[in-house]
Amino acid sequence: MPRHIAIVEDEDGVRENYQQALEREGYTISTYKNRAEAQEAFNNQLPDLAILDIRLGNERDGGFTLCRFLRAKSDRLPIIFLSGLGKDMERVSGMRLGAIDYMLKGTTTLDFLPVRVSALFHYLDVFSKPTNNDNSLVRGQLTLYVDRMEITWDNTPIHFTLTEFMMIQALVKRPGNPKSNDQLMQAANTYVSDNAVVATISRIRRKFKEVDPTFDCIQTVYGMGYRWVKSI
């Protein structure tokens, strides 16, 4: 069955170009011109991927609002922002809300967009395939279930977005070994600013601390990145 992609974009010509470019690759596309229209549709059924503009009609942050809505319905739905807003502030905000990628309209061609989407789906497929190896990683109080993409801390489930999960997995695979921002982005199959990586790590720490205020296993290695260490 073809993957179902939702595009939320208020400019008619741009929306149609995205739709045609992705339909040529065999995807099923639903398009929406504003947040309210998209939100009504998502209440009935979620797509396999959502591509969101940020400014939607009179709503300056309509895409951000819609991202929050989608994240409340699913921790696993891949969300991409495709926007003309290229400042770090917008990129960081998008990643904080749980997007897996942030692309710019000015540099994302109609040839590149389908390739990026295809690479994302391929990565997710490979990532979710069961393996013959042990499908869980245990690091002290943490248990990471690879196949189910779930994490527990002292047997308490914690809900992470796909990007957050992938970064945690990259850190816990080799405790003590620093991972640079670039390595964490590569592990999460996303390409954003360093500030967005910092924001994602901050959000991960906060979620752990919500269930264990003493959590201190993600250590900042200044000039290098981050590493997973044993809790002191």
Image (cartoon, rainbow, N blue to C red):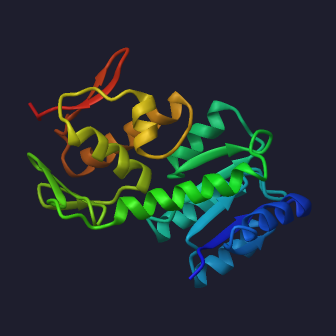
The answer to whether 215 is drawn above or below residue 74 in the figure is above
Please identify the quadrant where the C terminus is shown: top left
The answer to whether 16 is drawn above or below residue 87 in the figure is below
Q: Is residue 140 left or right of residue 185?
A: left
- Write the residue at 60% across / 78% down: 2
The answer to whether 108 is drawn above or below residue 119 in the figure is above
In terms of depth relative to the viewer, which is nearer, 110 or 101? 110
In terms of depth relative to the viewer, which is nearer, 172 or 152? 172
Q: Position of residue 5 (x, y in %)?
A: 64, 70
Q: Is residue 45 left or right of residue 87?
A: left
Give the quadrant of residue 146.
bottom left
Total number of numbered discs in the rendering: 0
Q: Position of residue 130 (x, y in %)?
A: 27, 67
State the residue lying farthest toward the top: 223
Q: Position of residue 124 (x, y in %)?
A: 44, 60
- Write the residue at 14% across / 60% down: 134
Q: Is residue 48 left or right of residue 132?
A: right
The answer to whether 118 is drawn above or below residue 26 in the figure is above
Please identify the quadrant where the N terminus is shown: bottom right
- Write the residue at 73% across / 54% down: 53
Q: Position of residue 231 (x, y in %)?
A: 11, 35
Q: Is residue 45 left or right of residue 112?
A: left
State the residue lying farthest toward the right: 13
- Write the residue at 57% across / 48% down: 101
